[in-house]
Amino acid sequence: MSSAVAIIAEYNPFHNGHLYHLSEAKRLSGAEYSFAVMSGNFVQRGEPALQNKLTRAKSAVLNGLDIIFELPVRFSTASAQDFAYAGVEMINSLKAADYLAFGAETNDITKLTAVSKLLANESGSFKASLNDHLKEGCSFPKARALAVLDELGSDFEEVITLPNNILAIEYLTALLKLDSPIKPVLIQRNAASHDSDSISGEFASAKMIRNMLYSGNHDEASRYLPSQTEALDEKFIRADDITALLNLSLINFQHTKNIPQPSILDMSEELSNKLRKLTLPLSYEEINEALKTKELTLSRIRRVLIHLLLDIRAVKTPSGIYCPYASLLALRKDSSKLLRAIGDNSCIDIINKRADYQPKDQYVATLYEYDKKATDIYNLLYFINTGVRLPNELSSNIVIV
């Protein structure tokens, strides 16, 4: 089979920057095929996606990708470290990618690789430095960044603090830990920066585009979206749409004295105590502001709130494999050769028809149940906002274009 390049993405929504990234991924790798591992209905920033996963997957395929697989919600809503590792592990397990393409603010892959080697093979001095910074009261991401600087020097400060660099380092670290033969392809981000409010020509950040769409400025947003991106006139889901359901989850949490083990994913004792002391009901923003501290970043709080809403718990895999299956979301009709190669060579399950899938053990069943529940809750949010009923996880069909 011809070579393939893989991408880990959210496509929330698929915009001109993503189209540029895909074009560069193909150009730099020379790959004939491309596929993506994409977040489902809830994303890494701890929020529901703007559009449902099938709509976003269809946009990605219409814009040139061959196949879209779903990253299980347990990992799509996780920390950058777990998000990146799970995505890379899934791609590695599919046994079809020759290259992994990702963006970064820096074009110096040597520096990114130096950091990733340090993180993949933590030295004694690095671990000691990390523990020292944690004892000082730093959050884990901050403590780890400071430990990296202690080891590698201040020249690496910008490398480890910019958001796309952080994910790039995690992707490289995962490739090292997995001893993967997949070759990294670095694409420097030159346009609007991650989550910025700036515009650069035909490029705007996903955050800015979402805000345009939330405000009803569809014509303005369309300037930064490929013409093939789906359903610009539909009702979009935003973070604070979870307010009522989140308050209900928090009320149940406060009235449950003995939370069953394992605990909610990423939930610390400090955060658990703060959640129990909230005077409800509160707006989504009020909840976030009431919980934020120096040690608890807003991004972590939002992830924990989503895990509480979805009842995602800290379940560990018995086999060491994070992602034991890959759910197919969308594909191009002419990508059958790639799909057949994946089917023949993959060392994890490929889910084509969800209703027929039988998890092979309790861990797999738990992950799959999280995905089904996430879709049910997302569909409920959509129904509350629009009155429209979306298909549930088991009755939805793969998008083929």
Image (tube, rainbow, N blue to C red):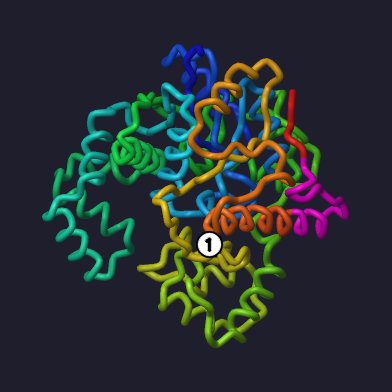
Residue that appears at 20% across and 50% down: 122
Magenta run includes residue 389: yes
The boundaries of the magenta stretch are 379-396
- Image location (x, y in percent) of residue 80: 42, 49
Q: Nearer the viewer, residue 146 or 315?
A: 315
Query: Residue 160, position in %: x, y?
Result: 29, 44
User: Horizontally, is 371 left or right of 391 in the view?
Assistant: left
Specify whether residue 51 is in view. Answer: no
Residue 356: image location, x then y, percent: 72, 44
Q: Is residue 282 visible?
A: yes
Up/down of 342 relative to 206, above or below: above
- Please report the residue visible at 32 percent of the width from the left and 26 percent of the height from the top: 107
Q: Is residue 272 left or right of residue 66?
A: left
Q: Which residue is mark 1?
A: 302
Q: Label 1 sits on what residue type?
A: Arg
Question: Measuring 45% from the left and 12% from the top, which residue is drawn there?
Answer: 30
Residue 251 lies within the magenta run: no
Residue 248 percent across, percent down from the top left: 69, 75
**Residue 36 found in image quarter:** top right
28 above or below 242?
above
**Nearest the eye: 304 or 340:** 340
In the displayed structure, 382 sits above or below 396; it is below
Where disc 1 sits, the SS reads: helix
Residue at the right extreme, as displayed: 387
Q: Number of numbered discs present?
A: 1
